[in-house]
Amino acid sequence: MKSGVILTVAGLAGIAVLVGQMYAGAQPHREASRTARFADPGGVAGVGTADLIVCIVSGIAEYGTVGGISAYAIGTTAQNNSTGGVLLSWRDTGAFANQHPVIAQNIFRLKDGRFEQIGMSWLKHGFCAADAPSCGSCVNAAGCDWLGVGCADTYGAGLNGFQTLLGPRFEVNPVTGAFPWPHSLPTGNSTLAGRMLVAINDVDPALNPGAQYFVEAHYITPDDAGTVTANNNNSYRPASVGSLSGGIWNLSTTGSTHQQDPAIQAWQDQDPSVGLVNINVANDGRFILGYKATDNGDGTWHYEYALHNMNSDRAAGSFSVPIPACVTVTNEGFHDVFYHSGEPYDGADWPVTVGGGDVSWSTDDFTFNPNANALRWGTMYNYRFDADSPPTSVTVEIGLFKPGTPALVPAHAVGPTARTLSPDITGPLSVPDGCVDAFDLGAMLAAWCSAVNDPNPPSPPCENCNPANLCLVDISGAGNAPDGCVDAFDLAKLLAEWCSVAGGNPCGTCIP
């Protein structure tokens, strides 16, 4: 039998179902292959595929602000989208007490082209399936411990912020859906503990002009964990910021629920120039990488990456982007979301390293610090920089935090283009100017390091060249390719393409 507290909450659940039905209808996912499928009743033993989805993200509850941190919760409605009559377990007592879903609540902000997670909750533990027809035909209502095919179960925002029902994320394995029972309870301030926490400055309209907000619900359940259907357990909905009341900004959901889409999809939905790619880790879970390159208009480009760990237990411990020789990287940045209420993780920002052919961010190694600030499931981190090279297709690498095989997973994205070898090395403003003239000749002669003209040549030849200049001025060699020397081969190529305005030959006639 459920405790008195749980029974009280269960009573509220029936009201929450009716409230959930009052919200605007959900927007179906754009892919026809993901449309709802309702099967004939078949019972738990039916042959089919277990599939739980979030069909409605509903209202937002507000609890107050303490120390600049505001507490919220969002309402959710889940639906049994299984085939073959498979029922979904909602049990929370006895030997099967940990056979029920847990619900993560997240909030994201799109501002100035950057899509960032700004808040997260602990996990609401499900109980007593309501078996309502909120999102479609409820064809086999199965009672409190099971959610029937096509049936829905609603928790209002107030119920999803009920602190005795909130357990930590660290106890849940997203690949198996396993967690201990009873779960731990949140610690800290009674207003904030365990709820979806957001810095008040992150939603202040005066500090975030033009920003857009999105709330996301993510269910993990043992029934479909570790299967392909575990990758459709997120849904998001736009949210708006209203007035400041009682020290907290009023948030409300707007528009429709985007079913079976994680919130990172909103970045691309709002900006079609954003790329998204799924990254599936063998015997583990899924990451989603978002990326975008923007011309700064001053000879540099901004590169923005958002990496969302949907349900990888191994988590991410590093992220790197290849940087070609002679490309200068500046304005590196990192953004994460803070854990709270007793989660044991270190919150230290990932330091950035530029060199060795890439720009990379990483946290502590698992063997050294198993509670390091890895990118764990249900969270998204951001990586960014500027570079003086336009974008091209590249392969980035994600280093997995927990030991195993593979240690690294590649992903498609955009990154800086390798420099094109050109005798247009520099100009009056110290950047290429479309002419091949005395500025370029001067730069080449200043970096000259020919083994032929060196009375005491090093071994190997030309190793004493200045690396900073070499990548700019080593434009040719015996095989018409850079050879590590700045010598007669490079000079010949420069003179062959000479087109100096001062020499009476307009630069517009230069060989491209």
Image (cartoon, grey):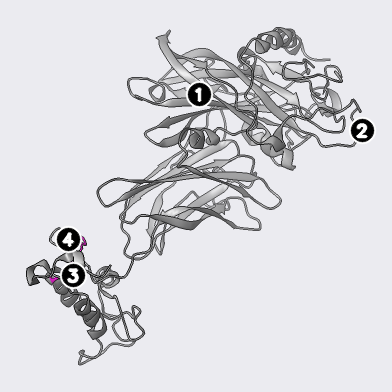
Identity, as a three-letter code, of the amino acid under mark 4: Ser
**Residue at figure coordinates x 41%, y 63% from the top left:** 357
Q: Earlier in the sequence, mark 4 or mark 2?
A: 2
**Residue at figure coordinates x 74%, y 13% from the top left:** 6
Q: Earlier in the sequence, mark 1 or mark 3?
A: 1
Q: Find the distance from the CA under tag 4 to the CA under tag 2.
A: 73 Å
Q: Find the distance from the CA under tag 2 to the CA under tag 3.
A: 77 Å
Instruction: Classify mark 4: residues with Cα within 10 Å, few (<14), some (14-19) or many (20+).
Output: few
The magenta segment? 430-437
Identity, as a three-letter code, of the amino acid under mark 1: Leu
Q: Position of residue 219 (x, y in %)?
A: 68, 30
Label 4 element class: loop
Q: Position of residue 64 (x, y in %)?
A: 48, 13
Q: Position of residue 479 (x, y in %)?
A: 36, 84
Residue at the disc numbered 2: 45
- Height in image: 70 above or below 499? above
Instruction: Please say if the residues under marks 4 and 1 sit with CB atoms less than 8 Å apart.
Output: no
Instruction: Classify mark 3: residues with Cα within 10 Å, few (<14), some (14-19) or many (20+).
Output: many
**Figure quadrant of the N terminus:** top right
Q: Find the distance from the CA under tag 1 to the CA under tag 3.
A: 58 Å
- Looking at the rendered structure, which numbered label has been put on residue 430? 4
Q: Earlier in the sequence, mark 1 or mark 2?
A: 2
- Residue 472 location, quadrant: bottom left
